[in-house]
Image (cartoon, grey):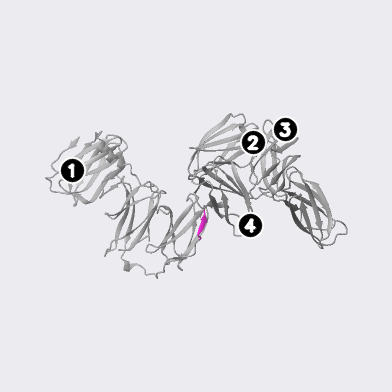
Amino acid sequence: MSSFADEIIATSTEFEDSAILELKNSRGNTVDISIVRIWLSGENEFKSFKTEQGWMGKKQLNGVIEFRSQNEVTPGQNVKFGIKTTEKNPTINWKAIDKNGNVIKSASITSTISEIENDTLVVKDLESIGINEDSSFRLIPERPSSGSDFRVIGKNFVPGQELDFYIGNNFDQEIKANSNGEILFTSKTSKNSDDERVEFILRDFAGNEKIISLRIVEAENRDIVELTKLSIGNTPKEVKLGQTITLSGMATSGSTLTITSKQPNGDILDIQTIRVNSDGRWTIEQLISPETGLGQVAIEVSDGKTKILRNLEVISPALINLYTAQTMYQPGDIIQIVGKAIPEQDMSIILEDSIGAEIYSRSISVGDAGNVDFTIELSRNSVEGTYTLYLFQGLEEGITLFGVGQEPESILILKSSKLNYKSNEDVKIIIQSIANAQISLILIDSADREILSDTINLGPDGREVYKIDSGGMSSGAFTMNAKRGESTGEVTFTVGFTSGSGAITIQTTKDEYKQNEQVLILGNTGSINVLLDIIITDPSGEIIKRVETFSDKFGVFKIDNFRIPADAEMGLWTVSGKSGGNFKDTEFVVIGESSELIVKLDKTEYTTTEIITITGSGTRSGSTVTFKIFDENGLKVDELNINAKGNGYFSTIWKLPDNSILGTYEIIVDDGIRNTSVQFTLN
């Protein structure tokens, strides 16, 4: 309903839990509205309010809200106020006052319910609450002088909401809280001849306010200090997530600095302040939050007049940080991989294609600087999709993604903290994907029965350690399946398994392999559900791969994720299976792509009492291999003849005669078509 008078017309419209009070100054009126006061009848209370631009509202302790404006409502104009109340259909008491404090009109009005869509647009604006109880701000310096610049820093505001900043009753500027609810901006006080108290006000669109009241003094009344040019010392070019760095420099003694971390687009990540020591030195510890994200971050140091900007490259805290020169390649391209790794420690590399097949593996040496730079040539028949490069140095692991024929897609990686868990021990599954991803999980047993299902959200770093209480799980093998959109992943672990397998049988599906060829290892154990270690060694006895595995409910085990490295040593390789006190070996031969005849000795230096082991490959199938040994003077010392195996591999031993002279010896090997030689020293 409406209340009419010659001077003022009032209308109140209700929509849901909000009401809009409109006051119209009649055209024939002769006075302007400067102040409006409103209060509610009964037990009803205000929850929040909103004003039009140019008006300021303040809720008093007696429940009255007083609105003031620099722009008076002249005859023929109107003004609207939005309110939210604890009870619907409020009775609003209002009073319109001129600039001299004279009451123009006072009355009450009850709201009418409206279904007009235009009203809802105004009411929705009332939701723009940017200030809560914990919101706070301060000025830097704490007491700015008349006509001087100052900074405003605040926290715990509603993220993303806009706020109005007033100095006294004068609107200064509109600012916006960042994603962390922080604000940082610069303003300036007006020049005053008399020291006076001024209110600095932050107000949201719902009418909530935070106020600082200070007495502003003239600049000449303040202490004069010697100015020092703002400076900052050396800063690192790269920092790791979660790392704390020390920033230090010089500035005017007693002044306050703001240290702001920003993303490249200007979004504020963090704001800190520090007061400069009396000697003009300042220092502060700056944490690179784990939520920062990888990439460039700017650190800005400001004293209110001067700003210094330093850029940092935020990298992963992992010890292995490698990346490809491009994110996408085509079949047949050469991929360049560069980055940092653990210094002076060899790195094993495994490349899997988009269907999870291991297509490349090798080992590289890392120098004392930790720099890594190598290439991989893709086959022209490479399948398209996202490829995963796994990197291993001791217990450390790294992962790098790139796309073939397309940009790489985010992947989902699951890894158990270990293969086997004791009963009543927590199972820990490490899950890795993109930041804040939602992951669906299903756990099944060896009979494909669902044990549990769950949905989780990953943290800002894209990682989560998911724990499962194994107390209610029987002894057996279990598989955790994870899904996020089109990405899937799985990991298998066991509960309650032990070693001690009984008799072990183990074999490879072929007797010989070429470099970079996939190897399938199959075997059985006398007992079921037991743990095994599979160790693969090259001809020099170096362990190339160690795999923890288990035999299933049928006593069967297999290893299908091993590929002969591209730079593998040719010769006789050994696969050893061990479980408790049980063990078994099998062998296979690695041959080269060419028909080159190769011969190797177990050492390069010997004494007269030692036995020399001679091995090699590349001979004609089943051919007779002749060994002729010559001393330092070119005299033939001995001659041996053996038959090579069907795969071209040969091996024999030879003992030096007791009267052999010291010096350099040569062994010439001949299979009837090709020959080669190798030397050793007799000391």
Dot 1 and dot 2 residues touching (CB under 8 Å): no
Q: CA distance from mark 3 to mark 2?
A: 15 Å
The 10 Å Cα crowd at callout 4, few under 14, some 14 to 19, many 20 or more, is: few
Which of the two residues, 533 or 206, is positioned nearer the viewer here? 533
In primary-sequence order, the first of circles 1 and 2 is 1
Q: Which residue is mark 1?
A: 24
Question: For mark 2, what is the residue?
Answer: 494
Q: Amino acid at mark 1?
A: Lys
- The three-letter amino acid code for the residue at tag 2 is Thr
The amino acid marked with disc number 4 is: Glu
Q: Residue at x 39, y 69 (%)?
A: 225
Can residue 655 be seen here? The reply is no
Q: Position of residue 156 (x, y in %)?
A: 40, 49
Q: CA distance from mark 3 to mark 4?
A: 42 Å
Nearer the camera: disc 1 or disc 2: 2
Disc ID at residue 527: 3
- From the image, state whether disc 3 or disc 2 is nearer to you: 3
Quadrant location, the C terminus: bottom right
Q: Specify start and end residues of the magenta stretch as a single range.
A: 236-240
One can see residue 480 in this view? yes
Q: Give x and y (percent) for residue 140.
A: 38, 59
Mark 1 or 4, nearer chain start: 1
